[in-house]
Amino acid sequence: MTELISIFVGMALINNFILVKFLGLCPFFGVSKKLSSAVSMGAAVTFVMFIASTATWVITEYILIPFEVEFMKIVIYILVIASLVQIIELFVIRTNYALYNAFGIYLALITTNCAVMGITLLNAQQSYSFPESIVAALGAGIGFTLVLAIMSGIRERLEMSDSPKSMKGLPIAFITAMLLGLAFSGFGGMI
């Protein structure tokens, strides 16, 4: 049990995909302007990470390894992730069209989000068991959502602040991301 907690905390805080591994920066900067969009995107990415980790673990353990075709791992993982994102996109279009418009292109970009591919490859590289893969995916997704929510809260406040014209928008977002990364590096001494 302590191993699972360690994996969860490690993926969420210590080895955060955005601030430590620098994966998933496109939605981080693109969707973090509003808290509602950021949390929704984080939930979608967490869901895709969870389902992708589940599916890829099963495919790896029961197809790729027994048939000795592990070299096909990346291609298979891409197909699984792309299929999942298409299903989620269809679901969001039919249930909440306003949310679909708020996501814009970033929902489709989950397919190419390197954080989703990163968790599936990390699970395979670490030879995680099924429960460990699930916990790692949930930890990575929660950490992804947490950082998106923190960044969106900061960016909403920065929009109302009086900052120099040259720093408005993306420049101040990069500086904020750097400061968040430094703050999250402090979690490295936790475990």
Image (cartoon, grey):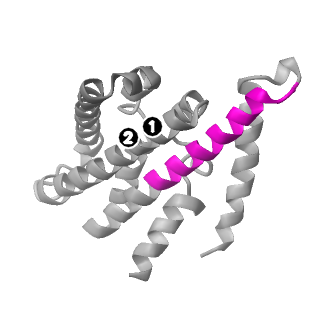
Q: Hey, what amino acid is under mark 1?
A: Met
The magenta stretch spans which residues? 141-163
Judged by its main secondary structure, the magenta piece is helix
Confirm whether the magenta stretch covers residue 114: no
User: Which one is nearer the viewer's eye here, 190 or 152?
Assistant: 152
Q: Hey, what amino acid is under mark 2?
A: Ala
For the residues labelled 2 and 1, the Cα–Cα distance comes to 5 Å
Q: Identify the residue at image location x=72%, y=23%.
A: 169
Residue assigned mark 1:
41
Confirm whether the magenta stretch covers residue 148: yes
Q: Identify the residue at image location x=59%, y=48%.
A: 147
Percent x, y for residue 104? Answer: 44, 20
Answer whether residue 34 is visible to the viewer in this image: yes
- Assess whether mark 1 and mark 2 are in contact (beta carbons under 8 angstroms): yes
Residue assigned mark 2:
44
Above or below — where is 84 with respect to 136?
Answer: above
Would residue 172 appear left or right of 61 to someone viewing this image? right
Q: Identify the residue at image location x=76%, y=47%.
A: 179
Which label belongs to residue 49?
Answer: none
